[in-house]
Image: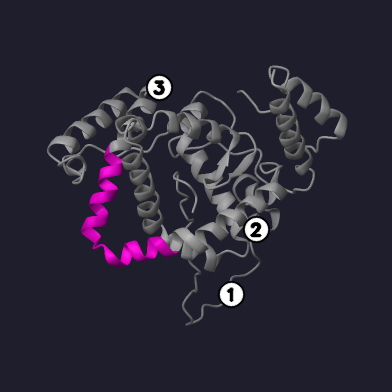
Amino acid sequence: MLRWPFGKYCYNEKNAFLFLMTSVSALDNKPSRTWFLLALWFLLLSGCATNDPRDPLEPMNRVVYKFNDGLDKVVIKPVARVYKTVLPQFVRTGVTNFFNNLYDVLVALNNLLQGKLPEASSDVGRVAVNTTVGIGGLIDVATKIGLEKHDEDFGQTLGRWRINDGPYLQIPLFGPSSFRDGLGRFVDFKLDPIYWLWYHDVATRNSLWALDIVNTRANLLDATELLQNAALDPYEFQRDAYLQRRRSQVYDGNPPPDKNMPHSELEDDDLGPTPAAAAPLPAAPAPTDRPATTVPAPAAATPATSPAI
């Protein structure tokens, strides 16, 4: 498996310098080389203060997270609330179906690249049915006739090609990601159907992207309320939920144990019962009339693949 040049240890200045000089050897432009050096130097040295090996850039990521969260609270979330209040549910459902139909083209392509031919054929069928019978994708007819909706992107394709996800990364305006998924997001952007269908109509293209952002944010209002109210540390909650979800997506819901996960998160699943729990108790307590009390686990919020907002 291809791995990124970040290990589970803190790079010292000598290692960082050697890595940086090797990384930028292909850059001929001196100003570009200078800025690239400074950016990577900061990335490497910022990884010296973290307790999670999956997140060696945590100090920098927290700064970006606060920026994204502030932008969301001030601009995007209020707009999404107005959007959700003004437009009825059936209109918002039609908008969601329209964008899902467009991006099913990318889903089909990524299923093909992953060697999932039946799923790719189903995705092509979905686009054909929803574009015609579904009036340009506004109505999801394909799901009603048994053509299942899939969720694939180029980041997952790279994962299927055994490319390690690399360090966790918060991207300005786009939110939670990783080095691998950041590269996948760039490829998905270059292949975006909206980009190509309205290539010469910049106003329409940008308006559609803005509508997609607001619509996606409106669909996630309830999930983000849970994130803010239930999590002691929203940053960690979002990071862990994102990494677990992406790992599950790459392995189609059946991921192997993650060796990079902190020990405290693995011990319940991988270490088995403790000797005290495995040993028989000397005597069972007398039954009581009080019913057993259970505390439901909060559902993990699903981060969006659109810009994090």
Mark nearer the N terminus (2 vs 1)? 2
Which residue is painted at 62% across and 41% down in the image? 168
Q: Which amino acid does label 2 sit on?
A: Ala
Q: Can I make out residue 267 in this image?
A: no
Mark nearer the N terminus (3 vs 1)? 3
Q: What residue type is labelled 3?
A: Leu
Outermost left residue: 133
Q: How is the image coloured?
A: one colour
Q: Which of 96 and 159 is in front in this view?
A: 96
Q: Distance between the residues labelled 2 and 1?
A: 16 Å
x and y, in percent, of residue 76 in the image: 45, 58
Q: Distance between the residues labelled 3 and 2?
A: 47 Å
Label 2 SS: helix
- Answer with left or right where residue 11 lies relative to residue 119: right
The correct choice, above or below, for 19 with respect to 138 in the image is above
Main SS, magenta region, reads: helix
Residue that carries the numbered disc 2 in the rendered image:
277
Q: Can I make out residue 158 in this image?
A: yes
Q: Which of 280 and 257 is in front in this view?
A: 257
Label 3 SS: helix
- Label number found at residue 147: none
Which residue is painted at 58% across and 50% down in the image? 240
Residue that carries the numbered disc 3 in the rendered image:
113
